[in-house]
Image (cartoon, rainbow, N blue to C red):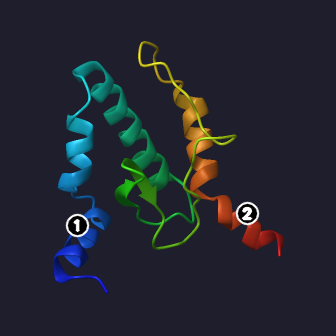
Amino acid sequence: MKTSTTKKAAANRRLGRSDPAVDGVFDAYPKPVKAKLLALRRLILDTAKATQGVGELEETLKWGQPSYLTTESKSGSTNYSGNRAILLDAADGLPDAELRHCVGLALTYHLGKRKAK
């Protein structure tokens, strides 16, 4: 059962407000890495807004890392290390178009499965 504090935190995340626990994870990184991660965060949020069927995202921590859940539509899939992980070098620029494509696929993973049935 969720406490009222937990419910408020979840509502804030769905409304685009920061979760202090997530902010703490970002703040723990060195400035250059943090800047790249915040750019990636913005790319994820922007891609979600621009992708039909995704709905609002909930930003939370999973496995101690920021995670973006499609709680409204249940259309997405959370990545894990393995064959769906994307490894980026913090010294390089973000491959914007490629990342938007991959993020869009992750955010709509279950939509494609639903249409196939």
Q: Give the SS element for disc 2.
A: helix
Image quarter of the C terminus: bottom right
Q: Position of residue 50 (x, y in %)?
A: 49, 52
Which residue lies at the image location 56% right of the left edge and 34% below the top edge?
A: 99
What kind of residue is marked 2? Answer: Gly
Q: Is residue 81 left or right of residue 56?
A: right
Farthest residue in the right direction? 117
Dot 1, crowdedness within 10 Å: few (<14), some or many (≥20)? some
Question: Mark 2 and mark 1: span between their CA atoms?
Answer: 29 Å
Q: Is residue 55 left or right of residue 85?
A: left
Farthest residue in the bottom direction? 1
Would you name the residue on which mark 2 appears? Answer: 112
- As drawn, the label of residue 12 is 1
Which residue lies at the image location 66% right of the left edge and 59% below the top edge?
A: 109
Image quarter of the N terminus: bottom left
Q: Are marks 2 and 1 in contact (CB under 8 Å)?
A: no
Q: Position of residue 72 (x, y in %)?
A: 46, 73
What kind of residue is marked 1? Answer: Asn
Which residue lies at the image location 35% right of the left edge and 55% below the top edge?
A: 61
For marks 2 and 1 on the same chain, the one whose residue lies earlier in the sequence: 1
Which residue lies at the image location 22% right of the left edge and 22% below the top edge?
A: 31
Q: Position of residue 32 (x, y in %)?
A: 28, 19
Q: Is residue 69 left or right of residue 81?
A: left
Farthest residue in the top direction? 91
Q: Give the SS element for disc 1.
A: helix
The quarter holding residue 71 reads: bottom left
